[in-house]
């Protein structure tokens, strides 16, 4: 169980009533995201409140009407997963920083500098976000925020979202071990085994990861491979 003095409130409104439980902030978020299943380390107390701050417990009648059960674990799980978890300032800052890093990585992988055709370094993207005073929303997904962030930093660094279709030919002795790398980094559009045992693959990739792909394949094949860009989209 969590210490009561370190707990935060998770609440939900149902049937016109408010129901609250006391939880560990980090563990509640992990439970909500499906990373943990047990409530043992999430709840500070197995009580359902109508107002934690006033120490007012919810009535059995209200609980039964709203949740159709009197099982505390089932009720607490609903409150945490479907309700609102009060976040500490520290946790909000941590979520925001993690979300920013994910957005930076997504921009680095999916967008390029149209002047050079290469991706911007991660630190340049992060500095642009800071300089433009972009507010990262800790509650919105990185995917939902990427375009908005790009729009706000375009005046500082040129950006273009681009995907590429590339053709790679890998000698037979490296073909088997390279297949997993290619599949991990891109979308396999076509693969052919040539008469000499070589593997020819057409791969769809975000433009920003081409350099990473080339480096990994080069390391594996000791530079013995052919690559050409078939299409830029």
Image: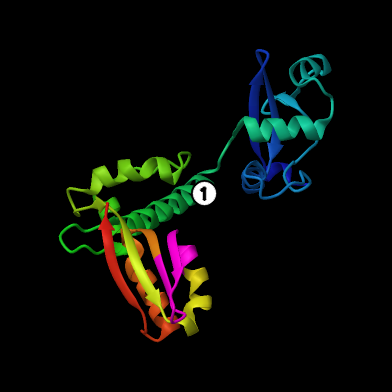
Q: Kindly identify the residue that appears in the image at 58 percent across and 36 percent down.
A: 86
Q: Nearer the viewer, residue 57 or 213?
A: 213
* Secondary structure state at the residue bearing disc 1: helix
Q: Quadrant of residue 52?
A: top right
Query: Farthest front residue?
Result: 195
Residue 31 visible? The answer is yes
Q: Kindly identify the residue that appears in the image at 53 percent across and 76 percent down.
A: 176
Q: Kindly identify the residue that appears in the image at 64 percent across and 20 percent down.
A: 13
Q: Kindly identify the residue that appears in the image at 37 percent across and 76 percent down.
A: 215
Left-right relation of 115 to 103 = left
Give coordinates of residue 206: x percent, y percent: 35, 57
Left-right relation of 129 to 222 = left
Magenta region, residue range: 182-201
Residue 119 visible? The answer is no
Is residue 197 rendered magenta in the image? yes
Q: Mark 1 points at which residue?
A: 90
Give coordinates of residue 111: x percent, y percent: 29, 55
């Amino acid at each position: 169980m969590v210490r009561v003095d370190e707990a935060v409130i998770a609440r939900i409104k149902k049937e016109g009533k408010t129901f609250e439980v006391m939880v560990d902030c980090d563990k509640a978020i992990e439970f909500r995201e499906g990373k943990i299943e047990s409530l043992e380390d999430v709840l500070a107390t197995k009580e359902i409140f109508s107002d934690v701050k006033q120490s007012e417990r919810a009535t059995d009648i209200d609980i039964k009407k709203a949740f159709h059960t009197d099982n505390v674990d089932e009720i607490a799980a609903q409150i945490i997963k479907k309700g609102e978890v009060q976040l500490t300032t520290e946790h909000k800052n941590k979520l925001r920083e993690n979300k920013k890093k994910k957005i930076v990585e997504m921009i680095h992988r999916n967008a390029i500098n149209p002047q050079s055709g290469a991706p911007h370094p991660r630190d340049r993207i992060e500095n642009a976000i800071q300089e433009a005073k972009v507010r990262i929303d800790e509650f919105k997904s990185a995917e939902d925020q990427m375009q908005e962030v790009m729009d706000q930093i375009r005046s500082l660094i040129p950006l273009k979202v681009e995907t590429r279709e590339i053709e790679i030919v890998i000698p037979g002795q490296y073909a088997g071990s390279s297949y997993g790398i290619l599949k991990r980094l891109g979308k396999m559009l076509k693969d052919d085994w040539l008469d000499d045992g070589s593997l020819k693959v057409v791969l769809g990739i975000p433009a920003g990861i081409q350099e990473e792909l080339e480096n990994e394949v080069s390391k594996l094949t000791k530079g013995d491979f052919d690559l050409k860009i078939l299409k830029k989209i």
